[in-house]
Amino acid sequence: MSTGSTPRAAVRRAATALAVYSSALSLTACGAIGGDGEGGSSASSKRRDDITVGLLLPDRDTARFEKFDHPIIKKEVASLTHGKGRVLYANAEASVDKQSEQFQRMIDDKVDVILVDAVDARLIAPDVQKSKDAGIPVIAYDRLAQGPIDAYVSHDNELVGQVQGRAITEALGTKASSSKVVMMNGDPADPNTAQFKQGALGELEGRVDIAKQYDTDKWSPAAAKANMKEAIRSVGLDRIAAVYAANDGIAGAVIDALKEAGADRIPPVTGQDANLDAVQRIVAGEQRMTVYKPFLDEAAYAAQMAVTKVQGRDIAFDALTRDRVDSPTQQNVPALLVPVVSLTKDTIKKTVIADGVYTVRQICTAAYAAGCAAVRLK
């Protein structure tokens, strides 16, 4: 969340930054600005294109990381460097120790910049410091890593929670105040979790009865399912009016647990990330909504930030990072916060289909044909 500003103000500044960035690129292409931000030769520009971006992603349970984030960043880096730049990629598979080893390997390999989506934002701080000491800039991606990072690109995470919480209160309507809601939060080691939760509570507290709350270790669907089973035993299957699920992996586990418990109908369940199976559940009427965070944009902007940082194009880099955020170890971190959208049955066409994330054919398989027909998705 941006310091000293509302979420919408942060989003407006991000949009302005992108416009300025586009202008900066145009000026660079026309020769008005030196390729290094200070004026440089064409020979040095060629050398700067031959760069290596280290990319560290946290897990494979979140479908978007392997399917979208990695390939988009790889493609964008190549495009920005005339095909000479490359991405050195590693996935931590939800292991803090493994990610630390991968981080050190990238430092040893002397990559030019590291993009890191931390498994644990606090525990990664020593690795960030090592990279800084080695003269390798670090850009926190999607989650705000602690330590001396150079920049941060993500979404307005408190707004994500607000959108989720609002979806629940709107679904419950006049019955909200007497309705029992279960909160299935994300991984407490992920700093985004606290912001999602803060945004959601801002919409839910005082408006619904929050019957139970759980944290989900490492965003594990298995852990979420176990927690949901406990919630069903504690609250009662028929008394759960809605479930705040912090992301789509948790939402799927929650819905499975409800079905296995014999639910006649699935209460409103939120989500986040717009995973394909979540979009299909929305079509089928099993999941109320998901928060679509245009990760196509987030990944592309991260690649742009990494390349401009290495190439020393300060004007373009500053244009991309007009927002500011605070971490527990650093104040006023340059940042870019990408807007988010509520994805429901009514907005599938305007979001993931319009952006080319999924096709109608991918969503509307035989099992979801009836649901697709009902929402005129064809």
Image: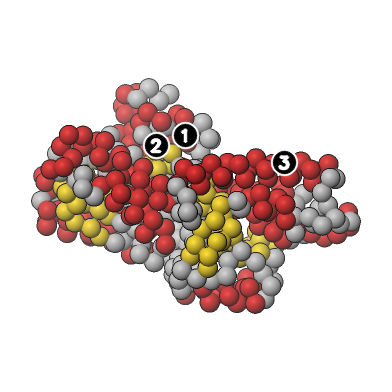
Q: Which residue is mark 2?
A: 343
Tell me the crowding category of disc 3: few under 14, some 14 to 19, or many 20 or more residues within 10 angstroms, Cα based.
Answer: some
Q: Which residue is mark 1?
A: 351
Q: Position of residue 117 (x, y in %)?
A: 51, 61
Amino acid of disc 1 = Thr
- Front label number (1 vs 3): 3
From mark 1 to mark 2, how far is it between C-alphas? 7 Å
Q: Residue at x 49, y 62 (%)?
A: 326
Could you say whether the residue bearing mark 3 is in a helix, strand or loop?
Answer: helix
Query: Where 267 sits versus 99, above or below?
Result: above
Compare marks 3 and 2 and give the one earlier in the sequence: 3
Query: Where 297 sits versus 154, above or below?
Result: above
Residue 24 shows in this picture: yes
Tell me the crowding category of disc 1: few under 14, some 14 to 19, or many 20 or more residues within 10 angstroms, Cα based.
Answer: many
Q: Position of residue 357 (x, y in %)?
A: 51, 38
Query: Where 39 sits versus 239, above or below?
Result: below
Q: Residue at x 43, y 24 (%)?
A: 378
Could you say whether the residue bearing mark 2 is in a helix, strand or loop?
Answer: strand
Between 150 and 244, the one lying in front of the other is: 150
Amino acid of disc 3 = Ser
Q: Which residue is mark 3?
A: 23
Tell me the crowding category of disc 2: few under 14, some 14 to 19, or many 20 or more residues within 10 angstroms, Cα based.
Answer: many
Query: Where 260 sits versus 108, above or below?
Result: above
